[in-house]
Image (spheres, grey):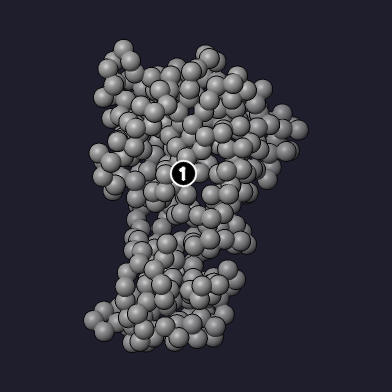
Amino acid sequence: MKPIDRTEVQNAIDSFAGKDVYLHLETTNGAYATHVDEAFFSAGAYIRNAFIQYEHGKIVGDGPYRIGLKLNIGWVYAEGVNHFEVDEQGRLLVAGLDYSGKLAVSMQLSPTPFE
Amino acid sequence: MEKERHVLVIFPHPDDEAFSVSGTLAIHREAGTPVTYLCLTLGEMGRNLGNPPFATRESLPKIRKKELIDAANAIGIEDLRMLGLRDKTIEFEDDEKLTGIFTDAINELNPSLIITFYPGYSVHPDHEATARAVVRAVERIEKNERPKLHCVAFSNNCIEELGQPDIIHDITAAEKKKVAAFTAHRSQTEAMVLDWKEKFENQDADFLEWIRKERLWTYKF
């Protein structure tokens, strides 16, 4: 993964618009957050291989960025994303890495199911 | 360390073994004791991807699989079994299915010692769910036929509630293998091991105590 290039990510988002895609969406503060700091409220959400189709999508912001996808009957969005890769399988892998490099949010789109 | 017939180690994540009992396992292997390691997941949800990142969410399991094999080799484990479950989902699996996997392994291997986490005192939901299932599997064996069950605990309240660990293994003799096992899990431990060389050279007392003493609690049924 490399730091986000907005144009490249926008192009990848555009290429999936109107098509069937599989979505991986995840937020995490790590399973040890409350162990390390008992005052920390641990929360996160995870969905893998949601089968969606979006009308259009946008990457917005100056970095870290936000990405939103407008669905026929709903929305998908992620905030805090700063790294990306279009991998050898043509999947768009976007992540938000915190100041120590740890993954905090992940949003990925693929034409085929994720393993 | 008592000589065992067969040691069965059950943890959910690649690197759980390195942190908790890699020295103990290396010493069992040096004594010629067979060790089987059931590793439930490939740590797919690990947050460390390298800094700067050399992994993605999708390549991480492939990298961690290789790291796990390297760590097992460093320890001398010949029977490493990757069970193909998914990180952070263990507690949502069917409880009976999990228990059955462990019962089958116990029946096949007839271990004299099982090592896993201590349920209630091992912090991560995968650790807890794995430990609960191992305890269920062992509990179903007749009391006088049960293998010993040694558990790893590290929750903030573990000493307060469980008391001091009744088993403390000094693994200094296998220290190099332990460091090699840690180092093998590069994607997760790279930042952590940076200052180890210096700590060894300076004979850092807290560090040496931490790395050389592996602490376990005998499970109380």
Question: Residue B169 versus residue A29: which sits nearer the camera?
Answer: B169
Element type where label 1 sits in the image: strand
Q: Is residue A115 left or right of residue B24?
A: left
Q: Is residue B192 visible?
A: no
Please name the residue that numbered disc 1 is placed on: B82
Q: Say what amino acid the circle numbered 1 marks.
A: Met
* B204 versus A76 height, above or below: above
Point out the residue furthest to the right here: B201
Question: Residue B184 versus residue A29: which sits nearer the camera?
Answer: B184
Q: Indicate the quadrant containing the N terminus of chain A: top left, top right, bottom left or bottom right.
A: bottom right
* B105 versus B41 height, above or below: above
Q: Indicate the quadrant containing the C terminus of chain A: top left, top right, bottom left or bottom right.
A: bottom left
Question: Residue B174 versus residue A60: which sits nearer the camera?
Answer: B174
Q: Position of residue A100 (x, y in %)?
A: 57, 57
Res B91 quadrant in image: top left
Q: Is residue B55 visible?
A: yes
* A69 versus B94 height, above or below: below
Res B221 quadrant in image: top left
Question: Residue A76 versus residue A54: which sits nearer the camera?
Answer: A54
- Name which residue lies at 68% across and 31% down: B176
